[in-house]
Image (spheres, rainbow, N blue to C red):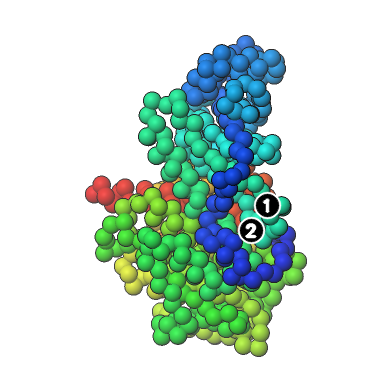
Amino acid sequence: MAASIVKRVSRVKKLNVSHISARYKLLTGSRHFSTSKQWNKALVLGVYENESTDSIDFTGTARKFDEKADGKISQLLLTVKKPLKCGKTRTLHAVDPEFSSVLVTCIGKRGEGYDELETVDKGRESIRAAVAKAVLQLRELGENEIEVDSCGDTEASAEGCHLALFSYDDLKAEKSRKPAVRISCATRYSQDKNSMEKEWRKGAILAEGQNLSRRLMEMPANLLTPTKFAEIVKEQLADKCEVLVRDKDWAESMKMGSFLSVARGSVEPPVFLEIEYKGRHSDSPLALVGKGVTFDTGGISIKPSQGMDAMRGDMGGAACVAGSLLSVSKLQLPVHVKAFIPLCENMPSGSATKPGDVVTAMNGKTIQVDNTDAEGRLILADALCYSEQFNPSLILDMATLTGAIDVALGAGAAGVFTNSENMWNKLQKASVRSGDRVWRMPLFNHYTKKITECQLADLNNIGGSRSGGACTAAAFLKEFVNNKNWLHLDIAGVMSNSGDVAYLGKGMSGRPTRTVIEFINLMSKETNNR
């Protein structure tokens, strides 16, 4: 992946892998809750934006709680003559004996929905951001048990809470870690508690999938080798999925010369993960493919040293595939999914692939490798070819592939290249619901010509110039796909978060895991309704 997307992040000291695994075995983002600890209980309530200084526009839960508290909430809020705006909060104390703190958060204007220009559901996004800010503020106050208002969308509320409270501090001293917080939905005033709890659980599971992706992306590369990635994923998914861990000999027998050419420079052996989730039987499963470069130096075409530590996250595509499958399996979606994850390091050494070398992919096409830092497309090429053997109904691949997509879209959206208008429409619909946006990019023959005009081989792994780099990378991948329903997601621009998404902290983002889960959910509903 090009160096232009590298961002500076903090370093961590080297620790023993088995020691880390023993401390945080499952790596899902959950914390250990002590039974002897003193728990301080707090409540988050939602209000809508209202210009009036004489009344408060409460959510249903907030209104009923205010009535129970003899109107104390509304009285205190009206004492301050400045109405709450979207995303702003008020923290109240001594309102109710059950709660040491009651935090009121403004979730925006009542009735907000799809914004065509922003291509998001503004109502859902405002809820996620508002409750996220609320629970973080309460954690800073020392509150460690929080009931949260559903705010009219229980799933979105749960997502915002659980995503906001994620932190990767497993390698820090105990005193430096974020404190554990218990989160639950304030269902006490609901007439349909079972339905609300079901939606809350779904939102929590969606967040759990993304948090697994974030945790994998954050782990230092010395602790998350290809072998260790496979072990963690197998442990996480073993209950609901079949996980096959393929070795270098298997890859050689499959003639995956393109994949293996990237792994040549590292002492860490390559691994090819094949995962199957069978929520229903199908002869044409959905195929997911994720780029799994657990550390990317650029190889012989080495990257600048500044910010190279962020390249531990260059397996973001693989992490998002794993996170998606975790949520899909926990939600027990009635769908058949096959996933394919090529894992390796891209390192310089005496055995590494050199610029100008020619390698042969699984489908027999030869590739002139003029830039060893354009390695993601090389490992994906063989994974895409292999996925075709299972007659998939569609193929969706994810990869932190190019710095060019970061230049084009920044952190605003993941770039999508597809040969199917129908698949694009479904993915875009899924992104509206998740709030994690996607944007369609061109797959013109114009870009294909840039990589097929090659001196030594059938294809060149770069386009000959810096222009349209994300598009020429997608055009390269297209040479290894026959499926008529193919989506390539270039997620390099959304790899990390530096304040762009209000309910994600700084660091690796795990995007667009929830969009992919929603997409799979839409596809499962369509298939089962036929």
Q: Which residue is most to the right?
A: 306
Q: Classify the position of the N terminus by image quarter.
A: bottom right
In whole angstroms, how far apart are the C-alphas of marks 2 and 1? 7 Å
Toward the viewer: 25 or 61?
A: 25
Q: Which mark is residue 66?
A: none
Residue 407 figure quarter: bottom right
Q: Is residue 170 something one can see in this rendering?
A: yes
Q: Is residue 265 left or right of residue 59?
A: right
Please state which amino acid type lies under the numbered disc 2.
Asp
Mark 2 or 1, nearer chain start? 2
* Crowd class of label 2 (few under 14; some 14 to 19; many from 20; radius 10 Å): some
Toward the viewer: 195 or 285?
A: 195
Please state which amino acid type lies under the numbered disc 1.
Arg
Task: Name above or below for residue 153 compared with residue 337.
Answer: above
Residue 246 figure quarter: bottom left
Name the residue tied to disc 1.
Answer: 177
Toward the viewer: 491 or 496?
A: 496
